[in-house]
Amino acid sequence: MTLTPGDWRIFADIHPAGPDGTLTLGIDAAVAGSYDPQPLPEDTRTARLGECTVTLDGGLVPGAAVGVSRDLLAELASRHGGGRLGDMVSTMAHSPAVLVGYPQLSRAMGRAKLDRRISERISITVQPRQGCGLCLDAHVGAARALGVDGGGIDRAREGASADPAIAGIVALALQVYGEPT
């Protein structure tokens, strides 16, 4: 494997013999050299390599997954009204260990001291940059259910808030998102 200069996150799923099932190993690797970060390409549902074209038509549904991922996805889908799962969750399904950690992270975030109306505003600010419209819609719906008005949601989409304290928290979240290290 040849990696170009930059930061890489590498995962390997290993299926050892025995009762323990799948093991996922991961490493963050910094490859030295001249690194010129580029913006992410525009979101697309079609990829081409040579003469081969692959088009993603819809999202992953729990019944299409295999093994442990099928059960975990079914659980997540039922918790979210049985609807379509977002691209992030669909991608995590390729590694059961990552998919198992996602609900644990969600539960830990639920125990956080940050008011949920603020955390939803942070999510509304970040999701357009992530490119997941389904996730953005879910967070907008959650914010509305928590009593955040339309103006607050619109300002959150712009990375702002009428409340200076919330504006500061949202600005910090954007800074961490843009430069996580």
Image (tube, helix red, strand yellow):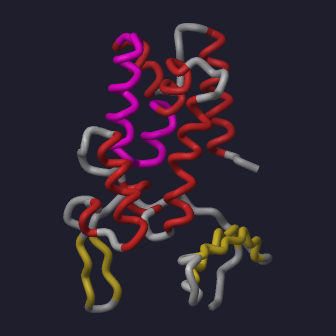
* As drawn, 113 above or below 147: below
- As rendered, which of 19 and 130 lies closer to the eye? 19
Q: Which residues are magenta?
A: 124-149
Where in the figure is residue 122, as x and y percent of width and height?
54, 29
Question: Is-magenta flag for residue 132?
Answer: yes
Count the numbered circles shown.
Answer: 0
Residue furthest to the right: 32
Q: Left or right: 171 with respect to 44?
A: right
Residue furthest to the left: 57
- As rendered, which of 67 and 149 lies closer to the eye? 67
* As drawn, 90 above or below 75: below
Q: Kindly identify the residue that appears in the image at 40 percent across and 31 percent down.
A: 139
Q: Kindly identify the residue that appears in the image at 68 percent across and 29 percent down.
A: 172
Where, by quadrant of the figure, is residue 83 drawn?
Answer: top left
Q: Quadrant of the N terminus?
A: bottom right
Q: Kindly identify the residue that appears in the image at 35 percent across and 86 percent down.
A: 49
Question: Is-magenta flag for residue 66?
Answer: no
Q: Main secondary structure of the magenta part?
A: helix
- As rendered, which of 151 and 23 lies closer to the eye? 23
Where in the figure is residue 82, as x and y percent of width and height?
24, 45
Where in the figure is residue 42, as x and y percent of width and height?
38, 58
Where in the figure is residue 166, as x and y percent of width and height?
60, 15
Residue furthest to the top: 163
- As rendered, which of 124 and 68 lies closer to the eye? 68
Q: Left or right: 84 with respect to 130?
A: left
Q: Left or right: 97 with respect to 46?
A: right
Q: Kindly identify the residue that appears in the image at 51 percent across and 37 percent down.
A: 126
